[in-house]
Image (cartoon, rainbow, N blue to C red):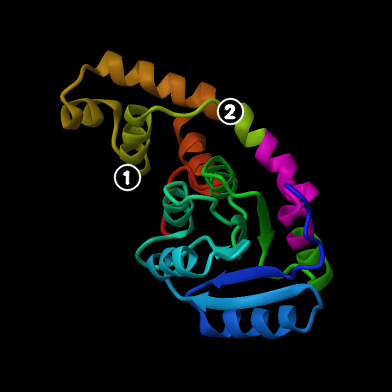
Amino acid sequence: MSKQSNKPIRILIVDDHPVVCSGLTSMLNAQSGLDIVGSAASGEEALAIVKRDKPDLLLLDLRMPGMDGIGVLQGLKRIDNPPRVIMLTSFEKDEDIYRAVRAGAQGYLLKDTTESEMITAITVVHSGNRYIPRHIAARLADRMMRADLTARELQILEHLSNGSTNKEVAEELHISDNTVRHHVNSIMEKLQVSDRTEAVATAIRSGVLSGTD
């Protein structure tokens, strides 16, 4: 496929905060070679615009009410020739970064990034490469080295975060104390921690458990 470098990069901004959308639109529209085709305030609206206007690239907010950024990434997989995606977020929890990249995002930027870095990221991602800032890439590598927790382990971790004892978890989930103990040991090993309190704290800090966010 020949590169049509003379064509502007057509961008859709997806964020539920109007101020963010208008700020990004005016900033990026001032750049030659970039064309903002519109903005969407929800995941559902974003997918509808993608199907209709076929932008080249999405600047996609991770956290939105209703369908979030991960939901949009999954929806894009069902569209022919989907746009490339840069996640744009105020959060850099390891689990968020991991989920976004695993779901297909080609870039990951924090909202307070500089204008020049954002333009670099857009150019790099549009050309078919990935753009993840070095400090975020290091954390992503660290998160990917940790084996994924199973659904059952996550369920037990939720109970532990509510202060349940092994015995209470066993009764709640209708499994033996021994099975719970085995799962707790596995969780601690995967999260590379030495006790259950640290396991819960690590899980909340990295976003594996949502905590009170």
Can you identify the residue that label 1 sits on?
162
Crowd band around label 1 with a 10 angstrom C-alpha radius: few (<14), some (14–19), many (20+): few
The magenta-colored residue range is 122-141
Q: Residue at x 58, y 72 (%)?
A: 13
Where is residue 187 drawn, in percent x and y? Answer: 45, 26
The amino acid type of the residue labelled 1 equals Asn
Q: CA distance from mark 1 to mark 2?
A: 24 Å
- In the image, taking residue 186 as reference, residue 126 lies left or right, namely right
| Residue 158 found in image quarter | top left
- In the image, taking residue 177 as reference, residue 174 lies left or right, namely left
Q: Residue at x 65, y 81 (%)?
A: 25
Q: Circle 2 sits in a helix, a strand or a loop, which is it?
A: loop
Q: Are marks 1 and 2 in contact (CB under 8 Å)?
A: no
Q: Which mark is residue 126?
A: none
Choose the circle earlier in sequence order: 1 or 2: 2
Q: Residue at x 48, y 58 (%)?
A: 69
Where is residue 133 drawn, in percent x and y? Answer: 77, 52
Q: Is residue 206 magenta?
A: no
The amino acid type of the residue labelled 2 equals Arg
Where is residue 111 drawn, in percent x and y? Answer: 66, 68
Q: Circle 1 sits in a helix, a strand or a loop, which is it?
A: loop
- In the image, taking residue 144 as reference, residue 2 lies left or right, namely right
The relative height of residue 161 versus residue 168 in the rendered view (above or below) is below
Q: Residue at x 49, y 52 (%)?
A: 73
The relative height of residue 124 versus residue 38 in the rendered view (above or below) is above
- Of residue 181 and residue 49, the one placed in the foreground of this image is 49
Can you identify the residue that label 2 sits on?
146
